Amino acid sequence: MAFHNLLIGLFTFILFNLPFVAGDTCSEVSNTSDIDIKLALSIEYFNEQNDYWSTRCGALKPSCILYPSSTEEVAAIVRILNQNNETFVIKSGGHNPNRHFASIDGGPLISTRDLNEVIFDPASMTVRVGPGNQWDEVQEALKDSGVTVVGGRIGEVGVGGYVLGGGLSFLSAKYGWAANNIVSFDVVLANATIVTASSTSHPDLFKALKGGGNSYGIVTSYQMVAHPQGEIWGGNLVFGADKTPEMLAAVRDFTEYNTDENAGIIMTAEITALGAVDLWIMFLFYDGPTPPAGVFKNFTDIGPFVNNCKSRSYYDLLSSNNWAVVKGSAYTIATETLPLPNATVGAEVLSTLYDHWKNTTNSVIGVSGMIGSVAFQPMPKMIARKAKEMGGDMLDLDDSVDRIILEFDFSYWLPIDDEKMDNATVRLYRGMRDLIMQFTESGILPEAYLPLFMNDGYFRQDYFGRLRTVDFARSVRERYDPQGFFAGRTGGFKM
C-alpha cells in the first residue's frame, strides 16, 4: 500500500509540474480555425505528396497538410506553432529534392498552394505573385498583359523557394536575379507578426530575404517589377557527346564575349543508366521574336542534330521546357561556382571538370533508373552589374570576373541506392571544389569570390559559409527570430 501511494504521489507531482504543451498543430488548427486541412488517406493529401519532384520527399508523411489562403491564416498557424515544439515545413512547388527542406515526416506541412494570386497593376508596373504558383502559371496569367516578371526557366518550378534562393532567369542578363526584382515581401515573422519588407520598411529584412532563404519568416506574397514582354524565341539544341570539346569551348566563349543582354542559355550534358544516352542538351532563349545573326552562332555551328528553336510566347517556352522534369524518381542536386578560365587554359580547365563529372557519373551508371547531368550556367559580369543596379542581394557578386555556375543532378529509382547516390553527389561537388582550388592556387584560374547558388545547393553544402554577407544575415536573423523558431524547427539552409 505504501508503495502504491508513493507511485500515485510521484505521478501527481510529475503531472502538475510538467510544462504546458498545447495540442499538436493539426488538432489545434482543426479545432480552432477554418483553415483547410487534409489528413492522410484523403485524395488531396495523396496528390500533394505525389507533387514533389523527388519521390524521396514524397515518401515522408506529414501529420497533416495545411492550406492557408491568406497571410492572416499563415499567421494563425504560426501562433499555434509557437505553443508547441513541433517541427514543420513550408512547401511551394516541391522542386527542391533535399529531404526535410519542404517535406516532413510526422509534423505539419504548410502548403502555399492556395496563396496563388497573380495580379498585375499597370499603374505601378508591378505584379503581386503568391508563392503557391508555378512559373508557367504566372506566365500564363500574364501572357495577354504585355508584361512579365523575372522568374524560372522551367515552368513547373515553384515561386517561393526559387525567389528566396536568388532565382536565376533567362532574363537575368537584362534584369539581374529574380530576387533583385522584388519591390516588397509580405512576411509572417516568428512571433506571428505580419510585416511588409521593402527598401523603406524593414530594409534589413528586405535585403536578407533576397537570397537568404527561409531563415527569417514565411513569405506569403511577392510584389515584383513588371517588365514589358512580347514574343520571344527559344527552344532546345541537342548534340552528341562527341561534340564535347566544341561545346565546352562555345560555352566559355559565350560567357565572356556575349554582350547581348537579351540572350540566355543553359548547357547540359546528360548520361543515363548503362550509358544508353550520352549527349548535350541546350536550352536557348532570346528576348525578341528572332535573335540577331551570330548571337548563338558558336553553338549552332557545332551542328546540333535537333533544333526546335522558334518564335513563341514566353508561356509557351516555359511550359514546353517541362519535358525536362523527371518525376517518379528520387534525385539529388548540388552546385559549385568557378571563375571563367581564359581562352588559353579554357580547354584544360573545363575538360578536367567535365571528366570528373563523367567519371563520377560512370561510377554509378548501373544504378536503376540513373540519369546524371551537369549544367553549365553562364554568370557573366553583366549579371553582377545588373544585380547591383537593381539593389543588390545576399550573394553580393562583384564584376571582377565572369563566372559559371555548375549544377549537378542525379536521379534514380530505388531507396536502396540512397547511400550510394549520396556518396556520389558528395564526391562530385567536393571533387569539383578541389579541382577549382587547385587551378586557382597554380594561377591557372583567377582568385575570385565564389558563393554557392542556393537554388541548386545540396543539403550537406555550407551555403551561408560561402557568403561574405553571412554576418549581416546572422544579425538579421537574431533581430527577427531571436528564439530560433525558423532556425531550429524547419528545414532549409541554416547558419
Image (cartoon, rainbow, N blue to C red):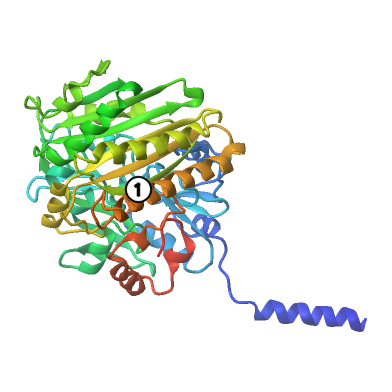
The answer, for residue 329, to whether it is visible in the render is no
Report which residue position mark 1 lands on: 336
The residue depicted at 12 percent of the width and 53 percent of the height is 385
Q: Foreground residue, 445 or 60?
A: 445
The answer, for residue 119, to whether it is visible in the render is yes
Q: Foreground residue, 123 or 253?
A: 253
453 vs 47: above or below: below
320 vs 403: above or below: above
Q: Position of residue 51 (x, y in %)?
A: 45, 37
Q: Position of residue 82 (x, y in %)?
A: 47, 68
* Image quarter in which the N terminus is found: bottom right
Q: Foreground residue, 202 or 113?
A: 202
| Residue 145 image-quadrant placement | top left
Q: Position of residue 190 (x, y in %)?
A: 39, 67
| Residue 72 image-quadrant placement | bottom left
* Image quarter in which the C terminus is found: bottom left
Q: Position of residue 265 (x, y in %)?
A: 22, 34
Q: Is residue 1 left or right of residue 366?
A: right
Count neighbours of disc 1 (C-alpha within 10 A) and say few if under 14, some if 14 to 19, many if 20 or more. many
Q: Is residue 421 left or right of residue 224?
A: right
Q: Foreground residue, 282 or 160?
A: 282
19 vs 331: above or below: below
The residue depicted at 27 percent of the width and 51 percent of the height is 166
Q: Tell me the SS state at disc 1.
A: strand
Q: Amino acid at mark 1?
A: Glu
The residue depicted at 56 percent of the width and 46 percent of the height is 61
The residue depicted at 47 percent of the width and 43 percent of the height is 425
Q: Is residue 70 left or right of residue 169?
A: right
> Which residue ends up furthest to the right in the rendered image?
1
